[in-house]
Amino acid sequence: MGVGEAVIFLGPPGAGKGTQAARLSAELGFKKLSTGDILRDNVARGTPLGRQVKPIMDRGDLVPDELILALIREELAERVIFDGFPRTLPQAEALDRLLEETGTRLLGVVLVDVPEEELVRRMLKRAELEGRSDDNEETIRRRLEVYREKTEPLIQYYEKKGVLQRVDGLGTPDEVYARIRAALGI
Ligand code: ADP
């Protein structure tokens, strides 16, 4: 029997998952496992994986499940917050198996809810501040489309399991953070 614990952050691109996941992981002593950050780090270092995924990410498409699952297996920790993973049903099913194999308890799945106009506004602002190469208007539109098609079905998937916690993602980061802690009861 393992003693692990996990939290999943779900939500559209630009919802603020990364910011909230970082704070929660720092305060609770969980490892933040962000597939987007890991991939961007590989792109920046020019690794073989980075060279493979850069064109995919720049288009706003999803990196193949097998690559993502290999990354996750490598980075798994006893107490972990998943940010940006799972993003497809096969990823969610694979994660279920992994949690079971490792005896890890899912504390909850936080859905950070933000209306679409606000998402686009935030990502365009981030483009100015951080210069992420996938934060241009065309790629943003594509990422939202991919989210609706591939990731949104996970809402129902986790709702059925009774683990989904919807949190309003509008307001200050502090307000959203307080809602998340209350929703998770931690
Ligand atoms: P955001 O949440 O702002 O869209 P992320 O940093 O989570 O951005 O992801 C950026 C890009 O990295 C995605 O558009 C996708 O190409 C790739 N990516 C990240 N996580 C995954 C994943 N779990 N499965 C497939 N592709 C992923």
Image: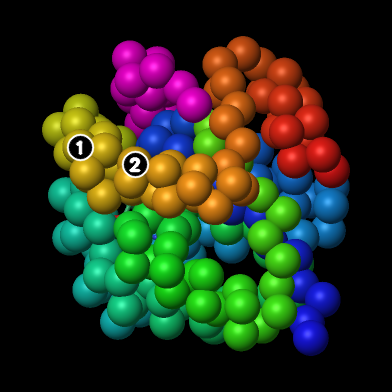
For the residue pair 33 and 150, the one nearer the viewer reads as 150
Q: Amino acid at mark 2?
A: Glu
Q: Is residue 99 visible?
A: yes
Residue at image coords 60%, 27% = 167
Q: Nearer the viewer, residue 157 or 65?
A: 157
Q: Residue at x 55, y 78 (%)?
A: 98
- Whether the magenta-drawn stretch holds residue 142 is answered as no
Which secondary structure type mostly characterizes the magenta part of the structure? helix
In the rendered image, which quarter is residue 168 located in? Answer: top right
Which residue in the protein does label 1 denote? Answer: 145
Q: Are marks 2 and 1 in contact (CB under 8 Å)?
A: no
Q: Position of residue 43 (x, y in %)?
A: 35, 66
- Label 1 residue near ligand 1, CB within 8 Å: no
Give how far apart the Cα atoms at labels 2 and 1 are: 10 Å
Q: Which residues are magenta?
A: 113-130
Decide: is 34 above or below 123. below
- Image quarter for residue 105? bottom right
Few, some or many C-alpha atoms within 10 Å of disc 1 (few <14, some 14-19, many ≥20)? some
132 on left or right of 113: left
